[in-house]
Amino acid sequence: HRDLHSFPTRRSSDLQTAAPTVNNGVIVSLDGESVWTVTGDSYITRLTLAEGAQVQAPAGKTLTVLVDGVETELTVGTITGRIHLQVC
């Protein structure tokens, strides 16, 4: 017999958090005058940055970008894959 109390339960707050993309095709394209302040974990499948575009975390936070699980520095151009923008 299984002890059901040992299984994790979901809180309503768990349902309101960002989840990894699953073939949903979230595409972000920023022109040279755009600034994207990422306020929480975000999952996208393609990111295009023009010269001068900025992607940043709010003041006092740091932004880490993972592409297919590998930490990646953002540069001008297009990246595709499982992109996770993580704010800490």
Image: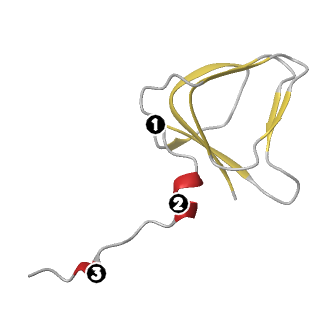
Q: Quadrant of residue 30?
A: top right
Q: Earlier in the sequence, mark 3 or mark 1?
A: 3
Q: Amino acid at mark 2?
A: Asp
Residue 68 circle label: 1
Question: In the image, is residue 37 above or below residue 77?
Answer: below
- Separation of residues labelled 3 and 2 (CA atoms): 18 Å
State the SS at label 2.
helix
Q: Amino acid at mark 3?
A: Ser
Residue 76 in the image: state x and y as whole percent. Answer: 73, 20
- Please tell me which residue is depicted at 51% across the width and 22% down the height of the picture: 25
Residue 7 in the image: state x and y as whole percent. Answer: 29, 74
Q: Name the residue furthest front.
A: 12
Q: Quadrant of residue 43?
A: top right
Residue 6 circle label: 3
- Please tell me which residue is depicted at 42% across the width and 33% down the height of the picture: 22
Residue 28 in the image: state x and y as whole percent. Answer: 67, 23
Q: Amino acid at mark 1?
A: Asp
79 relative to 22 in the view: left or right: right
63 relative to 37 in the view: left or right: left
State the SS at label 1.
loop
According to the image, label 2 marks what residue? 14
Question: In the image, is residue 82 above or below residue 41?
Answer: above
Q: Earlier in the sequence, mark 3 or mark 2?
A: 3
- Please tell me which residue is depicted at 69% across the width and 50% down the height of the picture: 40
The crowding category of the residue bearing disc 2, from other C-alpha atoms within 10 Å (few below 14, some 14 to 19, many at least 20), is few
32 relative to 46 in the view: left or right: right
State the SS at label 3.
helix
Q: Name the residue furthest left.
A: 1
Q: Quadrant of the C terminus?
A: bottom right
State which mark lies toward you, 3 or 1.
Answer: 3
